[in-house]
Image: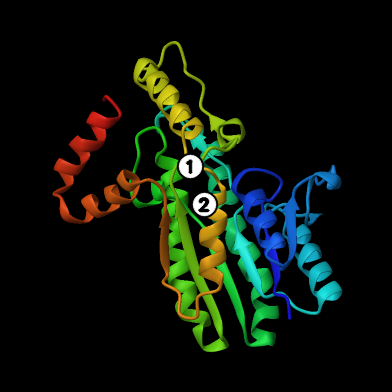
Amino acid sequence: MSKVILVTGASSGIGKSIATFLQEKGYTVFGTSRNPKNQENFSFELIALDVLKVDTIRKAVDYIVKKEGRLDVLINNAGMGITGPIEDTPTDEMRAVFNTNLFGAVDVMKTVLPQMRKQNSGFILNVTSIAGYMGLPFRGLYSATKGALELVTEATSMEVKSFGIKVVNVAPGDFATNIAAGRYHTPVFENSAYKEMYQSNLDLMDSHVSGGMDPIEMAKTVYKIINTNNPKIHYKVGGFMEKFSIVLKRILPDKMYQKILMNHYKL
């Protein structure tokens, strides 16, 4: 029987690559978008789901279960970026990114879990970020949301294990996607104490994304993970230095690690 898979945030970027790859592998894939259109551009069925609106999450999950009779895998990918100095970033925008990246992802998990418990099987894969392992300058809020989702994943994996449900996360590094266009960018204010530092770091972030890995690498990794009988809880996908930076944080004194980051970001 073909696994039934739900991929949130599948209209572009990493989500679209994952959904397309899994569809090509013979799975029954449903991707989501807040405003699905141009279905002809997708090899999988694209349905409406906004992680900020629980009623749309329930409607999407109910549609899949009614149509297919089951839901085997959730790829919790929908999210947004945010940049800016902590001092300059509007608190409402901080709340908005937490609502999307953390609480939105949690609400999708909460909605699929009853069906997975009923089946006594299921697989939830939360897409986090290598940025979630460290507080990056001018991306502190994004790092915080993804780090929080990593910890929620750890807790949930223990809570649902007895129901035959596996919960893991995969943390990508920089990938060549349109994520920069979808970020909330705190403006570079003329009177900001961070004006020059922030602008140079914005340019650096964009260059990292444009020079990032092909999203197909994420899709291949997700395929391997969901076909692993005894998966790990944490996976990382990125360049050597991106993954090695996590190791360095574990073994180096805090201030030494901070100095390395500051040198990298020219602070």
**Colouring chosen for the image of the structure:** rainbow
- In this view, the residue in front, 149 or 247, is 247
Which residue is the extreme one toward the top?
190
Residue 150 drawn at (x, y percent): 44, 61
Q: Is the Cβ of the residue at disc 1 closer than 8 Å to that at disc 2? A: yes
Q: Residue at x 65, y 63 (%)?
A: 108
- Residue 69's image quarter? bottom right
Residue 17, labelled with which disc?
none
Residue 237 drawn at (x, y percent): 43, 53
Left or right of 149 on screen, residue 263: left
**Secondary structure beneath disc 2?**
helix
Which residue type carries mark 1?
Met
Q: Residue at x 48, y 68 (%)?
A: 168
Q: Is residue 40 above or below residue 23?
A: above
Residue 214 drawn at (x, y percent): 53, 43
- Crowding at label 1, few (<14), some or many (≥20) Cα neighbours within 10 Å? some
Q: Is residue 110 visible?
A: yes
Q: Is residue 149 visible?
A: no
Which residue type carries mark 2?
Glu
Q: Is residue 198 above or below residue 42?
A: above
- In this view, the residue in front, 178 or 162, is 178
Mark-to-mark CA distance, 1 and 2: 7 Å
Left or right of 230 on screen, residue 226: right
The residue to which callout 1 is attached is 213
Residue 217, labelled with which disc?
2
Q: Residue at x 55, y 46 (%)?
A: 215
